[in-house]
């Protein structure tokens, strides 16, 4: 495939990723996109000028590191700060339009609270629950500062009920922790108030025809993908498409769609259980390409209402990866049990399913050794069954989603466990660690680049102060341990113990 076409596809994907940064910075999207794409421009120019030869190492590392640093600097340079929202206060975080209400909707202007309404607001804060000291006005919220005198969950529930009694559904009540560590309340205009929803049509969430059409299209592209993955199209081979030929990809397509579908369906059902508005799962079909032969970019759901609390945020984020893992692991075991052991090529390729080296991942190596036993020794590889390929890809998708960064599932998990500010710092640290690890595991380089394009902050919950219980904290730690098991290579001493 021509490098310019690949560059166009990469630029399109990068643009959609960079668009997500628009809510946290005023830096122009086109400038962020240009900086993010600059390494690809340099590498493509080198390839075109040198007969498609790969660029030298210094030309890979220097532009990549320089542009990542510049990209981070531009985001920080234009970051939306509290001073930009209200110059009178530099302590509290800015509550930007759609944050935390809903980033997909147009912001709605806050109607000012008059003196009489402010007196009514004062009565919503019992002194034994939350001692209200003063009220501040922001473009998109009314900030209520004071001292918390009860458990955060009790305070939030009491004050939300009082506000609803006084103002109806006019406001969403938000409880967040300020930069000084003190919780504060914010009354944000509710865009789903009857005052606004009565003006237009009700938003349609469930689009079964769209979801079904995308599922059917993804099923077709993943069936075709197996021809690319299995090497039947290598070297420009022509192949006559027929039902029998496409049927070869059925095991791969069905297992992959099942794992991705269960992952997103778990998100959807958990969101419904917590009364969070969410769309049906949508699959993303893509024609198989030599550089991306898998037939799909995955699946997603869209959250269309605020997350009520950190427990709900954790449950929604945790449910998808864990259900995908619970399904993918036994399928991987079955697929490996029906795979063959072959000799490892002199130049192993991670994406060569005809001679797959499971040592790139500690979890893959352990499962492969368990299912293949003594046949899998040093210098041997695995000719993978289609079910093993699909379930392996499902585990890789699980690992990527567990990355503790921004709006990924792992980002939601660490936010729920440690709070929004600490979760964002963990995300920054995780991105740097993955970048360092990618120099040893080159296949992680693309992950590291994508993670640097994703903002580390995700949307706060309405009650973003009440902490998780011990059970959820333990499950969160186990999910991060699962991430490490999947992405870390097999250590030398483990490889010697396994005779691999």
Image (cartoon, grey):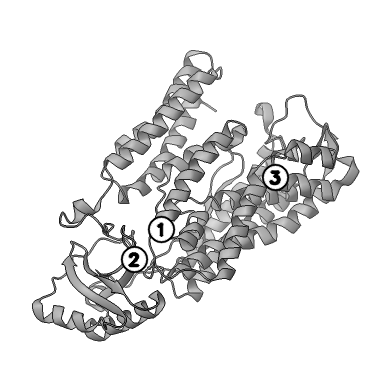
Report the residue marked by disc 1. 420
Q: Secondary structure at mark 2?
A: strand
Tell me whether circle 2 and circle 1 mark residues in contact (CB < 8 Å): yes
Task: State which tag comes first along the sequence, 3 or 1.
Answer: 3
Q: Residues within 10 Å of mark 3 (few under 14, many from 20)?
A: few
**Label 3 to label 1: alpha-carbon separation:** 52 Å
**At 88% from the left edge and 46% from the top edge, which residue is drawn?**
373
Report the residue marked by disc 3. 242
Q: Quadrant of the N terminus?
A: top right
Residue found at the very far right of the displayed protein: 374
Q: Residue 474 placed where, x, y %? A: 60, 64
Q: Quadrant of the C terminus?
A: top right
Asked if residue 157 lies left or right of residue 339, the reply is: left
Task: State which tag comes first along the sequence, 3 or 2.
Answer: 2
**At 53% from the left edge and 67% from the top edge, which residue is drawn?**
315
Tell me the mark number nearer the camera, choosing from 3 and 1: 1
Q: Secondary structure at mark 1?
A: helix
Report the residue marked by disc 2. 176
């Amino acid at each position: 495939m021509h490098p310019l076409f690949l560059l166009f596809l990469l630029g399109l994907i990068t643009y959609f990723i960079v668009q997500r940064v628009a809510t946290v910075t005023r830096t122009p999207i086109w400038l962020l996109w240009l900086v993010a794409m600059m390494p690809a421009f340099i590498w493509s120019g080198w390839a075109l000028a040198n007969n498609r030869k790969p660029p030298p190492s210094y030309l890979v590392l220097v532009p990549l590191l320089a542009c990542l640093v510049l990209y981070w600097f531009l985001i920080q340079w234009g970051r939306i700060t509290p001073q930009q929202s209200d110059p009178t206060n530099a302590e509290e975080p800015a509550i930007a339009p759609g944050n935390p209400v809903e980033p997909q909707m147009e912001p709605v202007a806050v109607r000012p609270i008059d003196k009489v309404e402010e007196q009514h607001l004062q009565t919503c804060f019992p002194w034994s629950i939350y001692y209200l000291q003063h009220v501040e006005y922001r473009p998109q919220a009314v900030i209520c500062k004071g001292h918390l005198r009860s458990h955060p969950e009790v305070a939030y529930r009491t004050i939300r009920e009082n506000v609803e009694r006084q103002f109806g559904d006019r406001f969403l009540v938000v409880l967040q922790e300020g930069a000084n560590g003190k919780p504060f309340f914010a009354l944000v205009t509710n865009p789903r108030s009857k005052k606004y929803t009565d003006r237009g049509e009700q938003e349609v969430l469930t689009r079964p025809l769209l979801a079904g059409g995308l599922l059917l299209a993804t099923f077709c592209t993943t069936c075709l993908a197996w021809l690319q993955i299995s090497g039947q199209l290598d070297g420009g081979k022509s192949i006559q498409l027929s039902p029998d030929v496409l049927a070869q990809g059925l095991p791969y397509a069905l297992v992959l769609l099942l794992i991705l579908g269960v992952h997103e369906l778990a998100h959807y059902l958990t969101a419904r259980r917590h009364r969070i508005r969410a769309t049906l799962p949508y699959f993303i079909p893509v024609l198989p390409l030599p550089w991306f032969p898998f037939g799909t970019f995955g699946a997603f759901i869209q959250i269309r209402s605020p997350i009520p609390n950190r427990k709900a945020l954790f449950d929604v984020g945790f449910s998808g990866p864990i259900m995908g893992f619970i399904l993918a692991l036994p399928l991987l075991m079955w697929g490996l049990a029906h795979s063959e052991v072959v000799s490892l090529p002199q130049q192993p390729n991670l994406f060569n399913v005809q001679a797959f080296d499971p040592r790139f991942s500690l979890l893959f190596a352990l499962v492969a050794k368990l299912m293949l036993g003594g046949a899998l020794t040093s210098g041997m590889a695995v000719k993978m069954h289609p079910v093993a390929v699909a379930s392996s890809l499902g585990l890789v998708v699980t690992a990527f989603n567990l990355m503790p960064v921004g709006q990924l599932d792992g980002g939601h998990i660490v936010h729920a466990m440690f709070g929004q500010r600490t979760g964002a710092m963990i995300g920054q640290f995780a991105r740097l660690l993955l970048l360092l690890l990618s120099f040893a595991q080159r296949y992680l380089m693309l992950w590291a680049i994508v993670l640097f394009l994703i903002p580390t902050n995700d949307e706060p919950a309405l009650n973003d102060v009440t902490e998780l219980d011990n059970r959820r904290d333990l499950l969160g730690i186990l999910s991060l341990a699962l991430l490490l098991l999947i992405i870390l290579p097999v250590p030398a001493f483990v490889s010697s113990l396994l005779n691999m």
